Amino acid sequence: MTLTKDQTAVLNKPEYSKLKNCYKGAKVLRAYRTLSIIICVVWFFFFIQAIRNGTTASGVVALIVTALLAVCSMSIVYFAGMIKVMFSSTQVSIKSKTIAYILAWLFPINLGIIARMIKTAEQEVDFETNKILLNSNRYYQQVCRTRYPILMVHGVFFRDFKPAFLNYWGRISDELIYNGAKVYFGNQQSAASVEECGAEIAARIRQIVLETGCEKVNIIAHSKGGLDSRAAIARYGVEDMVASLTTINTPHRGCEFADYLLGKIGQGVKDTVAATYNNTLHKLGDSNPNFIEAVTDLTHEACENFNLRTPDSPKVYYQSVGSYMPKASDGKFPLNFSYHLVKLFDGRNDGLVGEKSFPWGQNFIFLEPKSGRGISHGDMIDLNRENIDGFDVREFYVQLVSDLKNKGF
């Protein structure tokens, strides 16, 4: 990998030392791979020569000692590179790191494993340095400095918590803030009915407006958070305090597979699962968790009824976003597991929500995968902090918010 002058300058800055270590680790592993092959070829050449010419016991010992010294020396190089990559790369998966560590001594099998690690680490360095340069070049433009602040509303079974502890929105919110956005979080319960969460979001909006004097907010809501936000606007007296609502992969027309599951699963099983979830969610901060109500509100039947009694406000700009996965393996667990069931009932989907359920409002953006890798329900909030080929989730949100700014919101 050859870095440009500007990329090298980025890596030399102290705040990007982790990225620099990732680059150095990849270089060391690349050197290990090359030297290992050269040493093996040379040693094998001398070994063949020794067999042809005959050799003494001392010659055999010398060959063995030479081989051991080479193995020890190259192992030091290997682990030096591995340690740097393991502790600095976010894109090399834990699985790959573990396999590479366990199979460290199985030459030449480890060469194939580290080849993938090298490629991933170098791609990470290239991608992140270019992103740093992009943000640096447009910093003074503040492309995300909207007229009204951004309120980011999470989906079901998650909490916002403190961003430093567990940010539901991955690296997205920091990217928006760097580019000028003022960002707040919904903080509603993780598993409660749409109506209860809607009331909580309305209270949160009033709090933000009161404390900041901003008059209105722009809501960006993921999954069930989009339904919660629509309820807040329609029924809890904040329509004058909301400039826009952008829903991300929200099941506006519900999930038909949820209707099926709730109808097929016995009441005893539902009660047991609900009790386990509710107890756990209560410990994590939910004041009144209700697993069954949260899931029921996502069914096709419930959403049909919700839509009939939840008209859009003419005072608010509504738009929506959706994505899909062409195959189950594009998603992480449990989305790769649920994909086929959702496909059976809802057709093309993101691992959880069907394509036909996404559209809402004056504008709909549907993200078609530009490579073989699809975009899952979790990918849309940067859940796994993964750089996806053909889809830069952070830049997508920057452009989304920049468009809100250009619209005067």
Image (tube, helix red, strand yellow):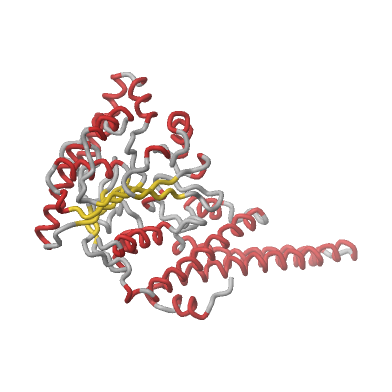
Query: How far from the left and from the top, in percent, is residue 187?
Result: 20, 49
Question: Residue at 54% across / 51% down in the picture?
Answer: 99
Question: Residue at 57% across / 62% down in the picture?
Answer: 118
In what quadrant of the picture does the C terminus appear? bottom left
As displayed, is residue 36 above or below residue 265?
Answer: below
In what quadrant of the picture does the N terminus appear? bottom right
Observer able to see residue 334: no
Question: Residue at 26% across / 41% down in the picture?
Answer: 227
Query: How far from the left and from the top, in percent, is residue 370?
Result: 53, 53
Q: Residue furthest front?
A: 314
Left or right, 69 with reference to 326? right
| Along the line of sight, the residue nearer the viewer: 383 or 181 | 181
Query: How far from the left and from the top, in percent, is residue 194?
Result: 22, 37
Query: How far from the left and from the top, in percent, is residue 151?
Result: 23, 55
| Along the line of sight, the residue nearer the viewer: 336 or 143 | 143
Q: Residue furthest left?
A: 210
Observer able to see residue 120: yes
| Along the line of sight, the residue nearer the viewer: 65 or 92 | 92
Left or right, 116 with reference to 226? right
